[in-house]
Amino acid sequence: MLYVFDIDGTLTPHREPATDEFIDFFIKWGKDKKYYLTTGSDFAKVEEQLPKTITTSAAATFCCMSNQCYVKNRLVYENNFEPSQDLIEALTIVLNSSPFPLRLGNHMELRTGMLNFSVIGRNADTTQREIYHEHDKIAREREAIAFELGTQFEDLDFTVGGKISIDIYPSGNDKSQTINWIIENEPPQPIIYFGDRVGEGGNDYAAIVEMQKYQDTSWHNVSNWRETMEILKNFDLVKNKDVL
Ligand code: M1P
Protein backbone atom coordinates (compact mmCIF):
# COMPACT_ATOMS: atom_id res chain seq x y z
CA MET A 1 0.00 0.00 0.00
CA LEU A 2 1.32 3.44 -0.97
CA TYR A 3 0.00 6.57 0.73
CA VAL A 4 -0.03 10.01 -0.87
CA PHE A 5 -0.71 13.06 1.30
CA ASP A 6 -1.47 16.65 0.42
CA ILE A 7 -0.02 18.88 3.17
CA ASP A 8 -1.99 22.10 3.90
CA GLY A 9 -5.40 21.23 5.34
CA THR A 10 -4.56 17.50 5.26
CA LEU A 11 -1.49 17.02 7.47
CA THR A 12 -1.19 20.55 8.88
CA PRO A 13 -3.45 23.58 9.42
CA HIS A 14 -3.24 25.81 6.33
CA ARG A 15 0.22 27.43 6.09
CA GLU A 16 0.98 26.51 9.69
CA PRO A 17 3.26 23.95 11.26
CA ALA A 18 1.85 20.51 12.03
CA THR A 19 0.61 20.17 15.61
CA ASP A 20 2.67 18.21 18.16
CA GLU A 21 -0.20 15.76 18.47
CA PHE A 22 -0.13 15.03 14.75
CA ILE A 23 3.67 14.86 14.53
CA ASP A 24 3.85 12.30 17.37
CA PHE A 25 1.13 10.22 15.78
CA PHE A 26 2.46 10.40 12.22
CA ILE A 27 6.07 9.55 13.05
CA LYS A 28 4.92 6.36 14.81
CA TRP A 29 2.37 5.55 12.11
CA GLY A 30 4.84 6.11 9.27
CA LYS A 31 7.54 3.78 10.62
CA ASP A 32 6.37 0.79 8.58
CA LYS A 33 4.62 2.68 5.73
CA LYS A 34 5.65 4.06 2.37
CA TYR A 35 4.24 7.52 1.83
CA TYR A 36 4.56 10.45 -0.59
CA LEU A 37 3.92 14.18 0.03
CA THR A 38 2.37 16.43 -2.61
CA THR A 39 1.64 20.14 -2.24
CA GLY A 40 1.06 23.41 -4.05
CA SER A 41 3.63 25.03 -1.78
CA ASP A 42 7.38 25.17 -2.36
CA PHE A 43 9.93 23.05 -0.50
CA ALA A 44 10.92 25.86 1.88
CA LYS A 45 7.32 26.05 3.14
CA VAL A 46 7.11 22.25 3.44
CA GLU A 47 10.15 22.38 5.70
CA GLU A 48 8.56 25.15 7.79
CA GLN A 49 5.44 23.07 8.31
CA LEU A 50 6.70 19.52 8.72
CA PRO A 51 9.67 18.26 10.75
CA LYS A 52 12.65 16.69 8.96
CA THR A 53 11.77 13.26 10.38
CA ILE A 54 8.58 13.33 8.32
CA THR A 55 10.00 14.87 5.12
CA THR A 56 13.08 12.64 4.97
CA SER A 57 11.01 9.51 5.60
CA ALA A 58 8.77 10.37 2.64
CA ALA A 59 9.55 8.32 -0.49
CA ALA A 60 9.40 11.63 -2.43
CA THR A 61 8.05 15.15 -1.92
CA PHE A 62 6.27 16.84 -4.84
CA CYS A 63 6.16 20.63 -4.52
CA CYS A 64 4.64 23.51 -6.53
CA MET A 65 1.75 21.36 -7.83
CA SER A 66 4.18 18.53 -8.68
CA ASN A 67 6.32 20.81 -10.82
CA GLN A 68 9.25 20.00 -8.60
CA CYS A 69 10.14 16.65 -7.04
CA TYR A 70 12.59 15.82 -4.27
CA VAL A 71 13.70 12.37 -3.20
CA LYS A 72 15.46 12.50 0.17
CA ASN A 73 16.17 16.22 -0.28
CA ARG A 74 17.67 15.62 -3.75
CA LEU A 75 15.99 17.44 -6.65
CA VAL A 76 14.78 14.83 -9.17
CA TYR A 77 12.97 17.02 -11.71
CA GLU A 78 11.45 20.46 -12.13
CA ASN A 79 9.35 22.23 -14.77
CA ASN A 80 9.64 25.86 -15.82
CA PHE A 81 6.87 28.40 -16.22
CA GLU A 82 7.19 32.02 -17.34
CA PRO A 83 3.87 33.86 -16.89
CA SER A 84 2.93 35.94 -19.93
CA GLN A 85 2.41 39.69 -19.75
CA ASP A 86 -1.25 39.09 -20.66
CA LEU A 87 -1.69 36.88 -17.62
CA ILE A 88 -0.05 39.41 -15.30
CA GLU A 89 -2.29 42.15 -16.71
CA ALA A 90 -5.44 40.02 -16.32
CA LEU A 91 -4.51 39.22 -12.70
CA THR A 92 -3.84 42.89 -12.00
CA ILE A 93 -7.34 43.75 -13.27
CA VAL A 94 -8.83 41.05 -10.99
CA LEU A 95 -6.82 42.40 -8.09
CA ASN A 96 -8.02 45.94 -8.66
CA SER A 97 -11.66 44.98 -9.17
CA SER A 98 -12.24 42.57 -6.28
CA PRO A 99 -14.73 43.99 -3.76
CA PHE A 100 -12.68 42.49 -0.91
CA PRO A 101 -11.20 45.56 0.84
CA LEU A 102 -7.77 44.37 2.10
CA ARG A 103 -4.58 44.27 -0.01
CA LEU A 104 -1.57 43.15 2.01
CA GLY A 105 1.10 42.55 -0.61
CA ASN A 106 2.73 39.57 -2.37
CA HIS A 107 -0.33 38.93 -4.56
CA MET A 108 1.50 36.99 -7.26
CA GLU A 109 4.12 34.53 -6.07
CA LEU A 110 6.16 32.91 -8.82
CA ARG A 111 7.16 29.38 -7.86
CA THR A 112 8.83 26.61 -9.84
CA GLY A 113 6.50 25.75 -12.71
CA MET A 114 3.57 27.79 -11.41
CA LEU A 115 2.23 31.10 -10.14
CA ASN A 116 0.19 31.54 -6.96
CA PHE A 117 -2.33 34.41 -6.95
CA SER A 118 -4.10 35.90 -3.95
CA VAL A 119 -6.43 38.91 -3.69
CA ILE A 120 -5.62 39.57 -0.04
CA GLY A 121 -1.95 38.75 -0.62
CA ARG A 122 0.42 36.18 0.84
CA ASN A 123 1.57 38.67 3.49
CA ALA A 124 -1.73 38.10 5.32
CA ASP A 125 -1.36 36.74 8.86
CA THR A 126 -3.50 33.89 10.23
CA THR A 127 -6.36 36.18 11.30
CA GLN A 128 -6.37 38.07 8.02
CA ARG A 129 -6.30 34.76 6.09
CA GLU A 130 -9.42 33.69 8.00
CA ILE A 131 -11.16 36.98 7.18
CA TYR A 132 -10.53 36.42 3.48
CA HIS A 133 -11.53 32.77 3.72
CA GLU A 134 -14.89 33.69 5.32
CA HIS A 135 -15.48 36.23 2.54
CA ASP A 136 -14.56 33.63 -0.08
CA LYS A 137 -16.86 30.98 1.40
CA ILE A 138 -19.81 33.31 0.87
CA ALA A 139 -18.76 35.14 -2.30
CA ARG A 140 -17.01 32.08 -3.83
CA GLU A 141 -14.67 34.63 -5.30
CA ARG A 142 -11.77 32.28 -6.03
CA GLU A 143 -14.01 29.84 -7.88
CA ALA A 144 -15.35 32.69 -10.03
CA ILE A 145 -11.86 34.07 -10.74
CA ALA A 146 -10.57 30.60 -11.63
CA PHE A 147 -13.50 30.02 -13.96
CA GLU A 148 -13.24 33.43 -15.66
CA LEU A 149 -9.50 33.23 -16.22
CA GLY A 150 -9.75 29.61 -17.29
CA THR A 151 -11.95 30.62 -20.21
CA GLN A 152 -9.60 33.49 -21.09
CA PHE A 153 -6.36 31.45 -20.92
CA GLU A 154 -7.12 28.03 -22.33
CA ASP A 155 -3.55 26.77 -22.12
CA LEU A 156 -3.44 27.34 -18.35
CA ASP A 157 -5.19 25.71 -15.39
CA PHE A 158 -6.48 27.73 -12.44
CA THR A 159 -7.26 25.75 -9.30
CA VAL A 160 -8.42 26.69 -5.83
CA GLY A 161 -6.17 25.37 -3.06
CA GLY A 162 -5.70 26.39 0.55
CA LYS A 163 -7.60 29.34 2.00
CA ILE A 164 -6.63 32.51 0.19
CA SER A 165 -5.16 31.71 -3.18
CA ILE A 166 -5.36 30.21 -6.64
CA ASP A 167 -2.65 28.07 -8.22
CA ILE A 168 -1.92 28.74 -11.91
CA TYR A 169 0.18 26.53 -14.23
CA PRO A 170 0.30 25.19 -17.80
CA SER A 171 -2.64 22.82 -18.41
CA GLY A 172 -1.91 19.37 -17.10
CA ASN A 173 1.11 20.40 -14.99
CA ASP A 174 -0.82 19.52 -11.87
CA LYS A 175 -0.88 16.86 -9.19
CA SER A 176 -1.58 14.18 -11.83
CA GLN A 177 2.23 14.34 -12.25
CA THR A 178 2.60 12.95 -8.72
CA ILE A 179 0.45 9.93 -9.59
CA ASN A 180 2.22 9.35 -12.92
CA TRP A 181 5.64 9.50 -11.31
CA ILE A 182 4.61 6.98 -8.66
CA ILE A 183 3.08 4.64 -11.25
CA GLU A 184 6.28 4.80 -13.32
CA ASN A 185 8.61 4.28 -10.38
CA GLU A 186 6.79 1.76 -8.18
CA PRO A 187 5.63 -1.79 -8.82
CA PRO A 188 1.82 -2.06 -9.12
CA GLN A 189 0.19 -1.85 -5.70
CA PRO A 190 -2.78 -0.09 -4.07
CA ILE A 191 -2.50 3.70 -3.79
CA ILE A 192 -4.52 5.76 -1.34
CA TYR A 193 -4.66 9.57 -1.55
CA PHE A 194 -5.57 12.09 1.15
CA GLY A 195 -6.43 15.68 0.24
CA ASP A 196 -8.68 18.53 1.34
CA ARG A 197 -9.54 19.65 -2.21
CA VAL A 198 -10.33 16.52 -4.16
CA GLY A 199 -13.53 17.89 -5.76
CA GLU A 200 -13.65 19.39 -9.26
CA GLY A 201 -11.89 22.78 -9.33
CA GLY A 202 -9.80 21.86 -6.27
CA ASN A 203 -6.05 21.41 -6.51
CA ASP A 204 -6.14 17.69 -5.58
CA TYR A 205 -8.73 16.88 -8.26
CA ALA A 206 -6.26 16.14 -11.08
CA ALA A 207 -4.55 13.51 -8.92
CA ILE A 208 -7.89 11.80 -8.31
CA VAL A 209 -8.80 11.84 -12.01
CA GLU A 210 -5.40 10.31 -12.84
CA MET A 211 -5.73 7.63 -10.16
CA GLN A 212 -9.07 6.51 -11.61
CA LYS A 213 -7.16 5.21 -14.65
CA TYR A 214 -5.59 2.57 -12.43
CA GLN A 215 -6.89 -0.32 -10.36
CA ASP A 216 -6.68 -0.42 -6.59
CA THR A 217 -6.71 3.32 -6.02
CA SER A 218 -8.81 5.18 -3.50
CA TRP A 219 -8.92 8.60 -1.86
CA HIS A 220 -10.26 10.55 1.08
CA ASN A 221 -11.46 14.12 1.08
CA VAL A 222 -10.61 15.35 4.56
CA SER A 223 -11.50 18.61 6.32
CA ASN A 224 -8.36 18.81 8.47
CA TRP A 225 -5.33 16.95 9.88
CA ARG A 226 -7.42 15.49 12.69
CA GLU A 227 -9.71 13.73 10.24
CA THR A 228 -6.65 12.34 8.40
CA MET A 229 -5.28 11.06 11.70
CA GLU A 230 -8.57 9.40 12.66
CA ILE A 231 -8.84 7.65 9.28
CA LEU A 232 -5.25 6.35 9.54
CA LYS A 233 -5.88 5.13 13.09
CA ASN A 234 -9.00 3.30 11.93
CA PHE A 235 -7.09 1.59 9.09
CA ASP A 236 -4.71 0.16 11.65
CA LEU A 237 -7.61 -0.98 13.84
CA VAL A 238 -9.26 -2.77 10.91
CA LYS A 239 -5.92 -4.32 9.89
CA ASN A 240 -5.28 -5.58 13.41
CA LYS A 241 -8.79 -7.03 13.59
CA ASP A 242 -8.11 -8.95 10.37
CA VAL A 243 -4.92 -10.31 11.83
CA LEU A 244 -6.76 -11.41 15.00
O1 M1P B 1 -1.25 23.22 -0.49
C1 M1P B 1 -2.46 23.91 -0.60
C2 M1P B 1 -2.23 25.37 -0.88
O2 M1P B 1 -1.61 25.98 0.21
C3 M1P B 1 -1.45 27.34 0.10
O3 M1P B 1 -2.71 27.93 -0.06
P1 M1P B 1 -3.26 29.22 0.71
O4 M1P B 1 -2.10 30.11 0.95
O5 M1P B 1 -4.29 29.76 -0.20
O6 M1P B 1 -3.87 28.73 2.01
C4 M1P B 1 -0.66 27.71 -1.13
O7 M1P B 1 0.68 27.34 -0.94
C5 M1P B 1 -1.22 27.05 -2.35
O8 M1P B 1 -0.37 27.22 -3.42
C6 M1P B 1 -1.40 25.58 -2.11
O9 M1P B 1 -2.01 25.00 -3.21
Image (tube, grey):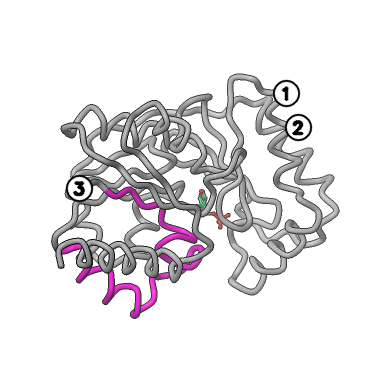
Q: Say which element carries label 2.
A: helix
Marks 3 and 1, how far apart in space? 38 Å
Q: Which residue is mark 2?
A: 148
Closer to the eye: label 2 or 3:
3
Marks 2 and 3, how far apart in space? 37 Å
Q: Is residue 19 above or below residue 33?
A: below
Task: Verify CB contact (< 8 Å) between mark 1 and mark 2.
Answer: yes
Q: How many marks?
A: 3
The answer to which of marks 3 and 1 sits earlier in the sequence is: 3
Residue 15, position as x, y percentages in the image: 49, 63
Amino acid carrying mark 2 in the image: Glu
Residue 20, position as x, y percentages in the image: 34, 79
Marks 1 and 2, how far apart in space? 7 Å
Q: Which residues are magenta?
A: 3-31
Residue 94, image quadrant: top right
Q: Is residue 137 above or below residue 201?
A: below
- Which mark, by number, is residue 84? none
Q: Is residue 177 magenta?
A: no
Q: Which residue is mark 3?
A: 59
Residue depicted at x 40% and y 70%: 17
